[in-house]
Image (tube, coloured by chain):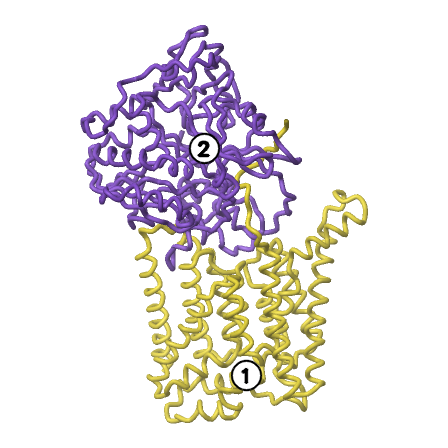
Amino acid sequence: MKFLSKHSPFMRNANTTQEILNIVLFSLIFVLIWSFVNIYFVFGTIVLLHGISMVVVSCIFAILSHVFFHFFTMKKENYKDSKAKFTYIYKKTKEGVPIITALILTMCLPLGTPLYVVIVATIFAEIFVKLMFGGFGFNIFNPALSGFIFAVISFSSIVSPYIPDAITSSTPLGIMNGTNWGIGARDYPNLIHNVVALFGGYSNMIFGTMPGAIAENARFAIILAFIYMGYKKVIDIFIPIFYIGTIFIVTWILGIHLGFGIEYPTTHILTGAIFFAAVFMATDPVTNPINRQGRIIFSIFFATLTMILRLFSNHNEAVGYSLLLMNTCVPLIDRHTANVTMKDLNKKKLSIVISMAVSFVVVFVFLFFYQ
Amino acid sequence: MGFFSGKNKVKIKGFKDLTNTKDIFEYLEPKIVAIPLRDATSETFDVHVKIGDYVKIGTNIATRKDHFVVPIFSSVSGFVKDIKEMYHVSGKIVNHIVIENDFKDEKQELFNPKENFENIPKNDIVEYIKKLGVMGLGGAGFPTYVKYNTDKKVDTILINGIECEPYITSDEINIKKNAEFLIEGTLLLMRSVDAKNGIIGIKENKPSLYKVLTESVLEHKNIKIVQTPDVYPMGWERLLLRQTLKREYDKLPIEVGVIVSNASTVIEFSKSLKTGLPAYERIITISGNGFVKNQNVKVRIGTILKEIIQEMGGYKGENLKLIYGGPMMGNTLDTDEVAITSIASSFLCMEEEKKEEPSPCLRCSRCVDYCPCGLQPVALMNAGEQKEVNLLRELSAFKCTSCGVCSYVCPSKIDVTEGVSKARDFYLSLFE
């Protein structure tokens, strides 16, 4: 009798990576459809068609860049017939998860982005940020986010939130950034109310459409997707909670300091890409720390950076820049939160409190020097 | 468990109903037995017999002679036929003493049987443990007398009846049949180190076992039966201590005043005291879809596994792997011509399922979340491949117990446990 020789364990659970990715993909498509429905009812068919074509083009070029990359980098002598080559490319492309990256990228872009910008951004994201680093699982930066930032920097005048004759060019984020979120204007207490009223109130911010990125038209769907993915344990729910929570608390205190009420933090978290970035980009497991303590510290500093960039610079992409910066800090955070033993638990709680405190201090030090 | 420490344990389907409702199959008359000259990690033995000698059940045939002294005994009566090298369950080639059974079952008692344990003087208890060569039957085979021969203050004796590995039910069956022995032995061990409390831990999904045990401890108020969640690896003493007593220790449980013993160890010890003979039989679980019959078997120590399997109907299916131990931590055997050791609790035979190709690591951090030791398995695996000694030290490579949870939960189907074990072995080999 001959027996096989294997290493333990001899039982595996039924979860697969594909299942995890499918749940993320499903959530993304849900958010996308929600925002397209919203767009259709508010802006009409032409804008909707443009949005759909952005998504389709991005997906096609994402897949194509994977196929071409693997075709040109494969060791051809290892694969004799064309069938083996095809299987290799198919497998590698499937492993590379091009569609999720493409979807996240297009949902970050504003509705008025020309198609060639979408194509360039997609190719940059897939080839230079993902595949050059060794493919899915090895990338340091979030590929979709890098592609978005690349598009914004390279085509800053073209990537705009409007389509001629359809949408106004002003976004709530743009207006608020224009006034530096009331930091300089203490004598203007109705600023927030006016801006919110201009865009249809809070209910429209949550349920309706908002000029800006595609994903901004579906904040409620993003919340639903967050609950679904958290229930399925695909994402760590504490990243969005700590990220949005830190922003809320910091801006609340800041708002009291500036003479605003609860509407100040609410407007902060309901403008821009904060919800989308918190749920779909910051939780990307490849580019965030590996244990929970690290992930919470990551979220707190991510929030701090977002606040600094948003309040004290005039960029509309504060969330994107700060997440890219935090991606570079992940190995550092991982290294310093490596060993989890039961004895260190108090230290861990302390580290969270300290990073929270640092976050407050940094924002207010900036404020002090700004004024 | 906590917010920061991760879950530390995982729920695994038990497959225990394959064997725990059936009667015990008995195979007590082997033609030959082969007693391996290896326990736990040691192979340095003084052999007291030579070929042709007549031995009885209970004759001391060899003694471990490194830093621990553990005698081993014959399990049948008959003539020593050979001392030869054979394949051992650990996967190594080890010297075995082969004894031909004459089916007379003559016995040689080590001491007069003790009817009443209360008459045994307190200071003699450890001496009896040592004389009987009692080893921890949980799987590690650590000599029990070393644990109890201590000057430190001990307040609790924790009896481990968890048996968290899937498929294995030999402890459960043993406790159910010998609950009286377990309680008596626990009381005796408590007396030997002046411990006030005794705790017997069993899983919460064994209500019948819980009933049997609670009924037998009614008159002993200082022994408590504790039910633990049905998770893996609950039977690891660190996790069991955390669950039952909420105590943390650095290296050994004795640091926090606890001694942990396996339930079967205690049962065999008190049985031996009653008979005056060392343990020469044990119950092993034969289970898995590769065997025709799944059942618990009572065998003589040293019986060749092949004979037992033949008696039970043999194998079925193709691409079989024969596993010594449980499916999570066991090791595969190349042949079934191995002798049952005193610490072997189960042999499984499973059909090899078609394995998916591992996909790239997603860094989903499930392995980190579920690791009972609080390690970072994939980081360790990569550090081990790169042979980064400093990083391995920083990541506490030595803490890994190879429990298999990281491979079990991995959605990418990467062999994480294999990689981490290699990394740990590489790291530990630097200090030898």
- Tell me which corner region of the image, top left, top right, bottom left or bottom right, holds residue B186: top left
Nearest to the observer: residue B130 or residue A171: B130
Q: Residues within 10 Å of mark 2 (few under 14, many from 20)?
A: many
Residue B267 versus residue A16 in the image, above or below: above
- Mark nearest the camera among 1 and 2 is 2
Image height check: is B170 above or below A117?
Answer: above
Whole-Å distance between the Cαs marked 1 and 2? 61 Å
User: Which residue shows up at 58% across the image and 65% down it?
Assistant: A24
Asked if B235 appears above or below A179 in the picture, the reply is above
Whole-percent x, y for residue B122 in the image: 19, 29
Residue pointed to by mark 1? A207
Q: Colour of chain B?
A: purple
Q: Tell me, for residue B251, which label it has, or none.
A: none
Q: Position of residue A371 (x, y in %)?
A: 36, 83
Q: In this view of the protein, can residue A26 be seen by the observer? A: yes
The residue singled out by tag 2 in the image is B345
Q: Position of residue B225 (x, y in %)?
A: 31, 46
What is the quadrant of residue B136 in the picture? top left
> Residue at (40%, 90%) from the top-left corner?
A185
Of B311 and B94, nearer the camera is B311
Considering the numbered disc 2 on the image, is that residue within a helix, a strand or a loop? loop
Please tell me which residue is depicted at 53% across the width and 90% down the height of the picture: A199
B176 or B264: which is nearer to us? B176
Query: Which quadrant would the N terminus of chain A be assigned to in this image?
Result: top right
Q: Residue at x 42, y 69 (%)?
A: A242
Q: Which chain is yellow?
A: A
Q: Amino acid at mark 2?
A: Ser
Q: Chain of mark 2?
A: B
